[in-house]
Image (tube, rainbow, N blue to C red):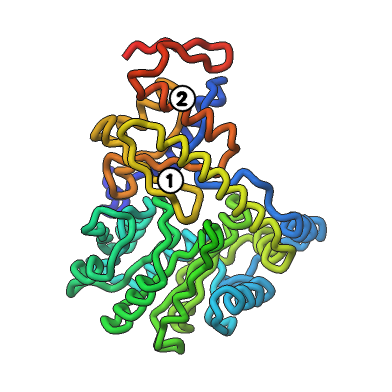
Amino acid sequence: MSFSHIGQSIAQSPTLKLNETAALLRAKGEPVIHLGGGEPKSKPPLDALIAGAALLNSGEVRYTPADGIPALKKAIIRYTEEFYGHSVEPANVIASGGAKQAIMVALQAILNPQEEVLYPAPYWVSYPEMAKLCGGVGVPVLPEDGSFYPKIGDLEQKIGAHTRAVIINSPNNPSGAMYSAEFIADVVRLCEQRDLWLIMDDIYHRLIFDGRRPISAYQFAKKKGEDSKLVIVNGVSKQYAMTGFRIGWAVGPRKLIEIMTNIQSHQTSGPSAVCQHAALGALAGVQSSVESLRVTLENARNVLVARLQTFPGVKVCKPDGTFYCFADFRAYGASSAKLAHFLLEKVRVLVMPGIEFGLEGHLRISFCGTIKDVTEGVERMKWALDPQAPNELYLGDRKLIRDW
C-alpha cells in the first residue's frame, strides 16, 4: 500500500499517546498519577453548562455557519475589546473546533509548500506537525543564552528567504515562561518590518501568576487595519476548564478570516452548535471561575517548584503562567524519553519528555491536578531517582522495592 508523503511524516501526538497509556494502566487498576496532563481538573462555569444544556433541551441542534454563530462572534469581539483593547468586526473573527484548529487553518491559509514558520523553543508539540501538514517547514528558535526567554536577535538569525510566519505562545507551553512586553513589542515590530505573519497563541494569557497582567500585541502594532498580519488565537479550553468542548477562535484581517472560513467549511463545517452556546455562556457569564482557577494553579505551582528544588541536580525555572513546569533532569540521564518511561514503569508517574517539546533532558510536569497528586507524584519521582532514598515505597497496599 502507498500513502502520502505528508501522511507518513506525521507522528502521533506524544502527549495524547502518553495520556492513552495512562488511561490503559488506570483501567487495569494501576495507581497512576498523571503529571503530564494539559487540562484543569476544575468544572466548567455553570453558565457554560446551562447554555449548552438549554440548546440541547430545545432540540434545535443544527448546522452552524462555518465561521461560528453570530452570538459567539459578538462575545469574542467583546472579549477582544476587554483584554486586547482592540475593536474588530464580525468579519475579523472565526470560531473553530479549538484553538488548535484555529492555528491549523491559519497556517493552511498562510503557508505555501516549503515556506517556513518560526517559533521559540521549547515549543508546543503540534507546531512542527502543523507546518508539515501544510507542506511547510517548522523552524524552532532556541535562545542562545540557554534560558526559556528568547531575545529578538534569536529570531532575526533564523529569518530567511522562505520565512513566512512566526508563532509566539506566551505564557509558553511547556516552560510556563511569559515573554516580556519588550520582547512582544520587538516581535511585532520585526514582523511588520519583514512583512511576516505573526500568530499569537494566547490560550493561557489569563492564567498568569505573581501579579502579572496579560499583554496585548495590538498595543505595539502600527498596522491595525486590513493590511495587518497579526492574528490572535484564543479559546475556552484552558481558562474556563472546557477542554472537551473544543471551541477556540482567531481574530485577524478580513481576507485571512475569509480564506480560513473557506478552508474550515470544507474541513469540518461550523463548530458544534451545543459547544458554541456553552462557550458563549462562559464568555458572557460570571468570570469568577477564571480567577479561582488561576489562584489554585499559582498555589499548586508553588508547591511543585518547592518540592522539585529538593532534588539533587535538578534545575527549575519558576513558571510565570500556564500549569506546566519544564525542569532540567539531565543529572539523571540524557534521554528524557527514557526517563519518562522509567518513571511510569517504576512508580506509575506520568510526565512528558522534553525532547517532544524541542529540548532534550527536560521533563514537562503539570500542576493542574490536585495538590495531593502533585505532592505524591513528586515524592514517587524522588524515591525512584534519589539513590539516598529508602529502599522501599508503598503505593497503597503495594510495596515497591528498589531493584535498580
Name the amino acid, label 2: Arg
Residue 214 in percent (x, y) is at 52, 68
Residue drawn 68% across and 56% down?
A: 289
Q: Is residue 312 left or right of residue 60?
A: left
Residue drawn 32% across and 51% down?
A: 7
Given residues 231 and 53, the one toward you in this image is: 231
Q: Quadrant of residue 117?
A: bottom left
Q: Is residue 80 left or right of residue 170?
A: right
Q: Quadrant of the N terminus?
A: top left
The answer to whether any part of residue 246 appears in the image is yes
Residue drawn 61% across and 76% down?
A: 82
Give how far apart the Cα atoms at labels 2 and 1 are: 17 Å
Question: Which residue is label 2 attached to?
Answer: 380
Question: Which residue is label 1 attached to?
Answer: 325
Q: Is residue 154 left or right of residue 201?
A: left
Given residues 211 and 112, the one toward you in this image is: 211
Q: Secondary structure at mark 1?
A: strand
Q: Quadrant of the C terminus?
A: top left
Name the amino acid, label 1: Cys
Residue 175 in percent (x, y) is at 39, 51
The answer to whether any part of residue 265 appears in the image is no
Residue 152 in percent (x, y) is at 27, 70
Q: Is residue 222 left or right of residue 26?
A: left
